[in-house]
Amino acid sequence: MSNLVILPIIIPLIAGIIAVFLNKKVVITRGLTKIFIIANLAIVSYMTWIVFNSGSIILETGSWVAPYGIILVADPLSIVLVLTTNIVAAACAFYAPYSLSLKKEQHYFYAFYFFLISGVSGAFLTGDLFNLFVFFEVLLMASYALIVLGGDKVQLRESIKYVLINLFSSILFVTVVAFLYGVVGTVNMAQIAERVQEVEQKGVLTAIGILLFFVFGTKAALFPLYYWMPKSYIVPNPVISALFGALLTKVGIYSILRVFTLIFIHEINLTHEMFIWIAGLSMVFGIIGALSTNNIKLIVAYNVIPAIGFIIMGIGIFNQDAISGSVYYLIHDMIIKSALFLIVGVIAYVAGTSDLRKMSGLMHHYPLLGWLLFVSAFVLAGIPPFSGFIGKLLLLKGALTDEKIAIVIIALLTSLLILYSIMKIFIRGFWGEKNTTMELGKRSMKGFIGPIVFLLTFSVVLGIGAEYIYPSIDTISAYLLDPEQYIDSVLKE
Amino acid sequence: MKINDVILQAITKIVVFIILTLAVYLFFSGHHTPGGGFVGGLVLASAFVLLCLAYDVETVQKGIPFDFKYVAALGALIMLIVGLGSIVFDVPFLSQSFTSMESSLFGKIEISTVTLFEAGVALSVVGVVVTIILSISKDV
C-alpha cells in the first residue's frame, strides 16, 4: 500500500479545481499552474526512481483488496509514460500564456488542461479495464472542451466529428468490457490475464481482443480509423494541439501495448500478425497524407500516424528488441511530437499563415526557429545520434530477427519520407528570398523558445544518453514480455 | 403574448419543497439502500430546473445567487479533500471509516466519512446539471 500512486492523478485535479475558482485572475492561475505542474513532475520523478529501484507501487483504493476493488499500478511502463506526460505538460504550461489569448485563458483553459493530465495519468496508472474506460472519459471530456476553446466555425465543425467518433468508440469500449466481463467474470486486468491464460484464449476471447483493438485503434488513429484525427488536431490553439498530439493518441497505443502484452497473447499468429499489416498501412497512408498537404500544421498532424505505425509494428513483432523499440519510440514520439506542434505553432504565428506556399525566407528573421525545426526533423526521422534513431534501430533489429523483411523496407522508406515531409517546411519556409508581402520580423518569439528547447533537450538526451537509458527500457520490455510479473505483483500470489 | 402561468407558479412553490425533501431523503437513504449523492443531487437539481421553468432564469438567480460552475467545483473539491484525508491517516486513498452514536431524537445513527464524500458528489451533480440547463436555455 502506498498512496504515492494516487498523487499524479489528484494533484492535477486539485490544481484544476483551483483554476476553476481563480478563472478570472489569470496572472495567479498562470503562476499556480507552473508551480503545480513542476511539483507534480518532481513527485513523478521520485516515483520513477522508486519503481525502478524497488519494483511496482500498487494501491488498492479504499482498502478493497485486488481483484475486488479498484487498483492503481505504477509499474515501470506506466510510470515512465506518466513522467513523459508531465514533461510535455510542463513545457505546454510555460508555452500557453504566450500562445493563448487572455479570453481563452479565462475560459477555463488551465482547468481543462489539468483535467486532461489527470485523465491521461489515470489511464496509464489504472490496473482495471473498466477504470481505463473511466479515465478515457475524463481525458476525452477535457479534450472536448479544449478543442472548441475559442469557438471558431472550423473548430465547431471539426469537434462534431471528433466528439462523434470518440463517443462511438467509447460506447464500443464499454460494450466490449461487458463482453469480456461476461466471459471471464472480472475487470481486473491481472485477473483477466490469469483467466484468459487458463483457457488458452479459446472461444470468443480472441474476437473480444480484436474488438478491443479496434476501440483503442480508433483512439490511437491507426490505419483504417485515422480519418478523424489530422484535421481535428490542427484546429485548436498550437499548445492544445501539442497536448493532443503528444498524449491522446498515445493513451490509445499504450492501451494496445498493455492489453496485447498482458492479456491476449495466446493467439499471436492471428492478432499480432494483423498488427504488422496495420502498422505498414498506417505508415504508408500517414506519410502520404503528410506529403499531400502544404499546411504546416497538417503536415505535423499527419506525422502522428506513421509514428503510431512504428509503435504498433513493435507490438506486432513481439520479441524483446521490438518491444523495447516500441517503448523507446513511444517515449521519444510523445516528446518530439509536442515539440513539433509547438514549433509549427510559432512558425504559423510569426508568418501569419500556415500555408507553405505563402512563406519564404523566414531564416533571415528567425534563424533560431529554423535550426530548432531542422534539429526536430532529424530527431523525428531518426538520424543518429538522436532519439528516433535508437527506437527505430531496435524496432528494425527486432523485425530482422523474425525475418519480417517487408515491414523493414516500408519502415525505412517511411523514415526517409518523414524526413522529407518536415524538411519541406524548412526548405520552402525558411530558405529563399525575403518575402515582402509578409510582415516578418515584427512578431517576437519571446517566451516560445524556452519550452521548445526544453523538450528538444530531452529528445537529444534520449538519443545521446541511450547507453544509460537503454537498460531501463530493456527492463520494461522484459517486464512486459513476462506477464506473470504483473499478475503476481497485483494479485500477490 | 404573455403566457398565463399562475397555476404552474403556484404549484411550483409547493412542489419544490416536496422535491427538496425527497432529495434529502434519497441522499441519506443512500447509505444502506438505493439512493445516495448522485441521485439526490439529480433530484435537487430538478427542483432548480422546475423553478427556472415556472419563473425565469433571472428571478431564480436573484433568489439563489450562486454561480453553479463554482458549486460543481466546490463539490469536486470536497470529494478530493475527503479522499486526501485518508493520506493524512496513512490508509489507502478513499478509505472510509464510520462510527455510530445514540441520539435522543433519531435513536441510533451512523456517522461516516462517506456522507461527506456523497455531499461532494451531490454538489457536483447539482452544479453540473444546472450549468448545462442554464447554458442550453440561454441560446434559445
Image: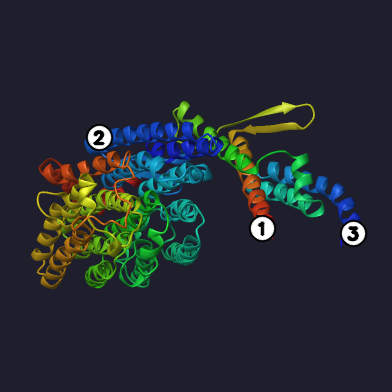
The answer to whether A259 appears left or right of B124 in the picture is left
Marks 2/1 in contact by CB < 8 Å: the verdict is no
Neighbourhood count class around disc 3 (C-alpha, 10 Å): few under 14, some 14–19, many 20 upward: few
Q: What number is the disc on residue B139?
A: 1
For disc 2, the marked residue is A49
Q: Quadrant of residue A186?
A: bottom left
- The nearer-to-camera label among 2 and 1 is 1
Q: Quadrant of residue A416?
A: bottom left
Q: Quadrant of residue A455?
A: top left
Residue type highlighted by circle 1? Asp
Q: For the view shown, which residue lies furthest in the front direction?
A: A436
Nearer-the-camera pick, A262 or B131: B131
- The answer to whether residue A80 is above or below residue A421 is above
Q: Mark 3 or 1 closer to N-term?
A: 3
Residue in the picture at 22% in, 50% down: A332
Q: Determine the secondary structure under disc 3.
A: loop
Same chain for the residues under marks 2 and 1 in the image: no
